[in-house]
Amino acid sequence: MEQAAPRMMTPRSRLLLLFLAAAAASGGVLQVRAQPDNNGFISINCGLSGTANYVENSTKLSTSPDTIFLDDEDAGSTHNISAEYVLPTLGKRYYTVRSFPDGKRNCYTLRSLVAGLKYLVRALFKYGNYDGQHRLPIMFDLYVGVNFWTIVNITDADAPVILEAIVVVPDDFVQVCLVNTGSGTPFISGLDLRPLKSTLYPQANATQGLRLATRRNFGSDDTTVAVRYPDDPHDRLWFPLVDGRIWNEISTSKTVHNIENDLFEAPSKVMQTAITPRDTSQNIEFVWDPEPQPKDPTPMYMAILHFCEVELLPTNAVREMSVILNRVPWFQFGFSPQYLLTGAAYNVIPVRGFGRYHVSINATKNSTLPPLVNAVEVFSIISTANVGTESQDVSAILGIKETYRVKKNWMGDPCGPKTLAWDQLTCSYAVSSPPRITGLDMSFSGLKGNISSSFSNLKFIKSVDLTDNQLSGSIPPGLVKRIQDGSLDLRFGNNPNLCTDADSCPTQTMEGKRSKSKLAIFIVLPITLVVVIVSVAVLVFCLPRWKNKQGSTRNSVKPQNDQTPSSLQLLENHRFSYGELEAITNSIQTVLGRGGFGCVYHGIMNDGTQVAVKLRSESSNQGVKEFLAEAQILARIHHNSLVPMIGYCIDGEYMALVYEYMPQGNLEEHIGGNGGNRKYLTWRQRLRIAVKSAQGLEYLHTGCNPPLIHRDVKGTNILLNKDLEAKISDFGLSKAFDRKRDHVSTNILVGTPGYLDPEYQATMQLTTKSDVYSFGVVLLELVTGRPAIIRDPEPTTIIQWTRQHLEQGNIEGVVDTHMCGSYNINGIWKVVEIAFKCTAHTSAQGPTMTKVVAQLQECLELEDLTGADTKFVFETSSSHYPNPRYNAYDADGHSITMGQSSFSFDEMEHGNGRVATVDSGPIAR
Ligand SMILES: *[C@@H]1O[C@H](CO)[C@@H](O)[C@H](O)[C@H]1NC(C)=O
Ligand SMILES: *[C@@H]1O[C@H](CO)[C@@H](O)[C@H](O)[C@H]1NC(C)=O
Ligand SMILES: *[C@@H]1O[C@H](CO)[C@@H](O)[C@H](O)[C@H]1NC(C)=O
Ligand SMILES: *[C@@H]1O[C@H](CO)[C@@H](O)[C@H](O)[C@H]1NC(C)=O
Ligand SMILES: *[C@@H]1O[C@H](CO)[C@@H](O)[C@H](O)[C@H]1NC(C)=O
Ligand SMILES: *[C@@H]1O[C@H](CO)[C@@H](O)[C@H](O)[C@H]1NC(C)=O
Ligand SMILES: *[C@@H]1O[C@H](CO)[C@@H](O)[C@H](O)[C@H]1NC(C)=O
């Protein structure tokens, strides 16, 4: 129980003040960030004035005012609750609230967490007529990060509401957001964060969290106080539940220990007390009612029953029991709690009922003693599958927010969830990757000062509108480069002080040593305010897709003769000397791979960027022509599914290309499982790789002018970045063709055996369908985990091999066993079908890459959908749970399992009036 404590300054808060003073003295803008305490706890008193922490009386936990945790320090307003609701026993945190009358979403950000770890998050609310309006009920939504947590429903001015969730936090911070749904002004009294070991509550993982319905301590002799920290090191709140009419209380004064690898670590103080039925011939029963949520009217539930024997039993006595939930027994055999050791029974697969949930703890026939139970926790399941905006985009947009002091609704995650995305932003949402910021409209926003370099850090941004502001200075080089290569539409008309003539603008500093070189750029401002920027030396080659759709006004752009190395002048800033390459690669040491061209080396640039340097060896059979072809292509085309080129080197006899480093190597290494200790790719990862690389090829075929045929599509030419995102590489053999003709005639056959389109082989006429064919082979490799040419027992192509197996109706026989059966078989069928269409005998029948992309995306969506549905499916090969629907562990850590598989959800009739309701509302303290 929290009580008012005298204001006391802890060493921590003194430090904080010193820090503030130092920041003020140096005149710098310093964002003060509160750190978790020694336990990793964060305890916040919302609406408390001042900056000083205080020590909470009963728990001795340091508690902070909320200002420094707010997304925007001016957000909301603070209030004292009405005096009539301030009771002597009321915890200090309920004295004040912060309310948020403005903005749809307001957030607190809790920092200095460890990404990927599990946390308990708790929010406290007491209305206490803080606004003097007696306005109830108040309802609003609570989000943890970008995922819906729960509805907050305040119906009683006096009763505190305590809401708790256990979630895996994907980043080193977590946001708790209050969302106004039009049913009253959101407000909050307090907020807690407690770290949990990852092994605790295994039901909470990256994609699903637990929303606490109730946590009760049975048989406690003090019925007014919840057990919490320091008795529970994890500071869960265990509220007492006693009913002397139907239950006897039993207890021990001896310490109860947790078993090894305890999944719940119920504290001794809670486990020392238990209840048994007063009528020893009876059993223990209780019920709870589901709490419908707006988007989930029948949430799924999970119950954890905590057991421990508190009496030293005579040798002939047996206490053996079983658990029955909604008439379905959890275990085939009874179990006996161990003396002074914790044990728990819980359902592994959450249950979804349509009425009241009824739990019965029955003694078995062999039992000579009545059943007992020490504590119960009930959770419903929340999805935490939504991911926040990509972190680089978040830092960039926060930089912009800070530079221009943007107010608007810029709180919480920029793009997520979709319905709460920031005004003025356009985001792209992919199925299984984080949202990206693609557009930003800041016209008429009163922006002053320079154009922030943060704009250039929005790597996926395609359009920025800065018209009608008071911006000054010049356009940052990072943006100029993107305008030049056609990947950015920047509008900046009506900024009278903005310098748009590169020649006369003072240069802004830019990362990289060659940045000082003058950019030869002319900027034209047509009356339409659509800016057209054309470099003198080079013309934009590939138009980004969105341009085509919007019908770009940039019609001054013409394709240029493909063969002249002059296009490399575009990359003049990126020309390296051999000496520089030696420095970058630490004297050409670490070999990443070998190809026809020579070796690829690992390097690190001055600014820490990792790169791959492809150095042409003198013995290379790949000529200067291929080198120049690749350099020219990469200098002009940019797409996030193509490996980006950072620069090149032509220095005496040395020729090299410098690319962005792809730490996860190439696809073939992953498929073959020979990438060292790399894990095998999951089906979902494979699908994402398929979609991404298909998009890259589609771009070559349709987004470039003239279009390009890659000519060497294969697993080793699909590289993976650290997030396993696929990028097409190796354009040495690529060929441009005339859109009017549908093919290019060639006189040398190039490509890789196993991937070569037989039609191209026969006719020597190259079309985009030749790439489609090779891509079909890659798809089959992704499904089967086998190489393009299978040598065992007889050499055969992967296409024939797959067909043969399928003719025998054996789809499972072709699927890569390393995926451990975790895929949707319909998705596999669909991908195999696409692969067969790609490798169809006549290219006229084959689909275009555009069609392939669309179909693969459908597969990915299908996979995501079924991923959600399979929560109901019987678990087969989970490593955590040995195949049960229910799982209990006793003191030995042995699992008791049963093969129960059907459920009934009938309403129970409650005989004898011995049923206690485990109400999920909190009790006042
Ligand atoms: C804080 O706790 C101490 C004993 O631990 C007690 O004497 C004191 O009255 C408490 N203060 C308040 C404000 O409750
Ligand atoms: C709340 O009450 C305290 C005194 O108990 C006072 O100092 C403070 O100004 C009040 N805050 C508001 C917002 O009224
Ligand atoms: C809010 O709580 C009241 C009282 O418990 C209940 O009647 C009402 O249905 C709840 N509303 C929602 C939306 O949960
Ligand atoms: C989380 O657990 C659920 C249910 O066991 C499972 O379906 C899901 O795949 C898990 N998610 C992760 C990321 O492990
Ligand atoms: C468990 O006990 C309750 C109440 O005594 C009884 O109604 C129910 O049938 C029992 N269930 C089993 C499976 O023994
Ligand atoms: C009851 O005890 C007997 C004798 O110890 C044993 O054979 C039997 O399996 C037990 N029954 C159950 C249901 O545990
Ligand atoms: C704006 O950029 C100019 C160079 O273009 C620089 O000299 C100046 O310091 C910058 N001003 C601010 C406030 O960053």
Image (spheres, rainbow, N blue to C red):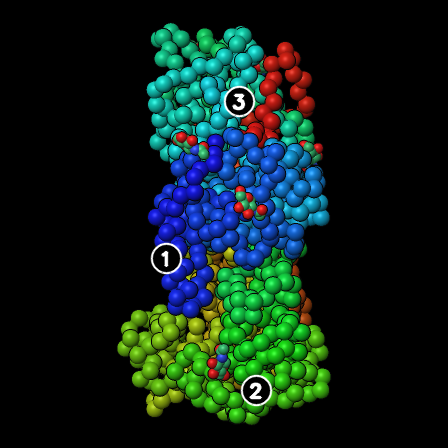
Report the side of 716 relative to 837 (left or right): left
Marks 1 and 3 sit apart, C-alpha to C-alpha, by: 46 Å
Circle 3 packing at 10 Å, graded few (<14), some (14-19), many (20+), is many
Q: Residue at x 65, y 87 (%)?
A: 525
Q: For the residue marked with disc 2, what is the amino acid?
A: Cys
Q: Residue at x 35, y 8 (%)?
A: 315
Question: Is residue 875 in view?
Answer: yes
Q: Position of residue 230 (x, y in %)?
A: 39, 33
CB within 8 Å, label 3 to label 2:
no
In the rendered view, would you say 51 is above or below 918?
below
Q: Position of residue 3 (x, y in %)?
A: 47, 34
> What number is the disc on residue 18?
1
Q: Residue at x 55, y 77 (%)?
A: 449
Q: For the residue marked with disc 1, what is the amino acid?
A: Leu
Residue labelled with disc 3:
241
Q: Secondary structure at mark 1?
A: helix
CB within 8 Å, label 1 to label 3:
no
Q: Tell me: is circle 2 under 8 Å from ligand 7.
A: yes
Q: In the rendered structure, which disc, 3 or 2, sits on the residue that comes first in sequence?
A: 3
Residue labelled with disc 2:
499
Marks 1 and 2 sit apart, C-alpha to C-alpha, by: 43 Å
Q: Residue at x 71, y 84 (%)?
A: 528
